[in-house]
Image (cartoon, grey):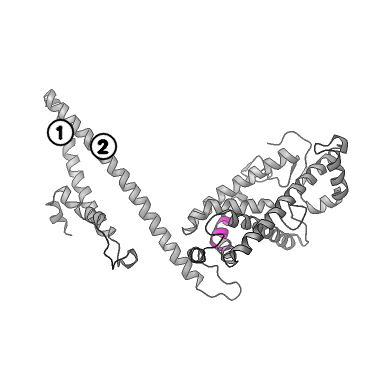
């Protein structure tokens, strides 16, 4: 629309298209999907014209404010009321524009990301097939009415168990590549599981799920924050309960109490992107293929196993810590019977094999 022509319109006439679109109803043969183009662009141009008109009106008020001393008391009060009403209108309009900007920016980012993910998923790779797009997984879950649709107990439980296993496997491979030997990286006494990775997988999923179709930077910084919090809390809880530490970053730059550091926080950010853009949709696409009844049964069986595993592991580590600190079974906090059981079932040599990097500290200075 021509700018000169717009200047002849009243403010009400200039913003009329927005009101028309707001009140417009779709006919029976129309749908949101059939819209050839968004109505927002022409409306936004009309709004810009209205804003330019408003700026000229406000500029005129500046001159009146400068000459306010020449007004009568009655005129001054009336003018003051007019100005403050205008200020309130501008603030409310600004808040609406901010909401509109946030919503449209998010919509543009998500639409672009969904399309890119689908296009990337359609490309063929020689070694590893590309991960399915999150939007495709969402559609499949909705279509099949999966027992693990969206974010619910079943999906989070399975992701926790999968994450606990995959994390250990990746650490084993890294240890073999970097050190030339295989060393246990398990966090539980039964099986190659480390609950820290499982908790991390759940935390990343819950924190990043709503951003799964957004750009990678949102996933990176969110993963960096969430992973660092999980790592710090787990380190603190382990030391509080067991009197031990499985990692210490005291010699790393930009560390906090040796529990987290900038480098590994950045790794958590990278992991966040890798998880929500690649690993999560792969695991979710496998879970959705499991029949609902079978999937629920498998989930509960694995949950019971993991809970028992965690309880036994906690008791074994607590008793191991007591043995390191020369606490006999009769003085054990877990009782004589359990202490003797763990002494026989999980002696120091066996525990050292399972928890190869665990170090017990007798000092009181840990931060």
Out of 50 and 157, give the one closest to the viewer: 157
* Residues packed near mark 1 inside 10 Å, few (<14), some (14 to 19) or many (20 plus): some
**Residue drawn at (18%, 33%), measured in percent from left and top?**
82
Q: Is residue 196 visible?
A: yes
Q: Quadrant of the N terminus?
A: bottom left
Quickly name the residue at label 1: 64
Tell me the element at label 1.
helix
Q: How far across and how far down the image is residue 321, in percent?
A: 81, 41
Q: Residue 88 bears which disc, if any?
A: 2
Specify which label sits upstream in the sequence, 1 or 2: 1
Left or right of 177 in this view: 285: left
Left or right of 38 in this view: 347: right
Q: Is residue 164 visible?
A: no
**Residue drawn at (29%, 40%), measured in percent from left and top?**
91
**Residue drawn at (82%, 39%), measured in percent from left and top?**
322
* Residues packed near mark 2 inside 10 Å, few (<14), some (14 to 19) or many (20 plus): few
Q: How far across and how far down the image is residue 230, in percent?
A: 62, 46
Q: For the stretch drawn in magenta, what is the main secondary structure?
A: helix
Front: mark 1 or 2 = 2
Q: Quadrant of the C terminus?
A: top right
Left or right of 84 in this view: 347: right
Q: CA distance from mark 1 to mark 2?
A: 18 Å
Which residue range is magenta in the image? 269-279
Q: Tell me where residue 298 sits by quadrant.
A: bottom right
Out of 322 and 266, give the one closest to the viewer: 322
């Amino acid at each position: 629309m021509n700018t000169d022509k717009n200047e002849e319109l009243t403010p009400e006439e200039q913003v009329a298209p927005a009101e028309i679109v707001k009140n417009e109803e779709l006919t029976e043969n129309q749908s949101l999907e059939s819209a050839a183009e968004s109505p927002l662009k022409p409306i936004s141009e009309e709004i810009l014209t209205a804003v330019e008109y408003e700026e000229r009106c406000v500029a005129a008020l500046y001159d009146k404010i400068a000459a306010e001393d020449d007004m009568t008391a009655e005129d001054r009060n009336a003018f003051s009321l007019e100005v403050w009403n205008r200020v309130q209108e501008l603030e409310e309009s600004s808040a609406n524009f901010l909401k509109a900007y946030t919503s449209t920016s998010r919509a543009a980012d998500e639409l672009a990301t969904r399309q890119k993910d689908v296009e990337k998923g359609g490309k063929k790779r020689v070694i590893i097939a590309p991960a399915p797009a999150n939007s495709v997984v969402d559609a499949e879950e909705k279509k099949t009415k999966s027992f693990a649709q969206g974010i619910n107990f079943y999906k989070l439980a399975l992701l926790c168990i999968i994450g606990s296993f995959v994390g250990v496997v990746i650490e084993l491979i890294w240890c073999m590549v970097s050190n030339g030997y295989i060393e246990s990286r398990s966090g539980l006494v039964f099986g190659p599981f480390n609950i820290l990775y499982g908790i991390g997988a759940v935390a990343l999923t819950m924190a990043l799920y709503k951003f799964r179709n957004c750009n990678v930077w949102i996933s990176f910084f969110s993963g960096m924050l969430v992973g660092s919090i999980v790592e710090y809390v787990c380190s603190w809880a382990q030391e509080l309960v067991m009197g031990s530490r499985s990692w210490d970053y005291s010699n790393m730059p930009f560390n906090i109490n040796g529990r987290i550091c900038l480098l590994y926080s950045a790794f958590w950010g990278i992991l966040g992107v890798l998880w929500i853009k690649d690993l999560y949709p792969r695991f979710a696409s496998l879970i959705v293929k499991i029949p609902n009844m079978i999937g629920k049964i498998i989930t509960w069986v694995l949950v019971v196993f993991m809970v028992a595993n965690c309880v036994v592991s906690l008791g074994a580590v607590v008793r191991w810590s007591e043995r390191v600190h020369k606490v006999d079974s009769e003085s054990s906090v877990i009782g004589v019977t359990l202490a003797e059981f763990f002494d026989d079932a999980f002696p120091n040599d066996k525990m050292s094999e399972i928890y190869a990097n665990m170090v017990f500290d007798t000092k009181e200075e840990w931060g």
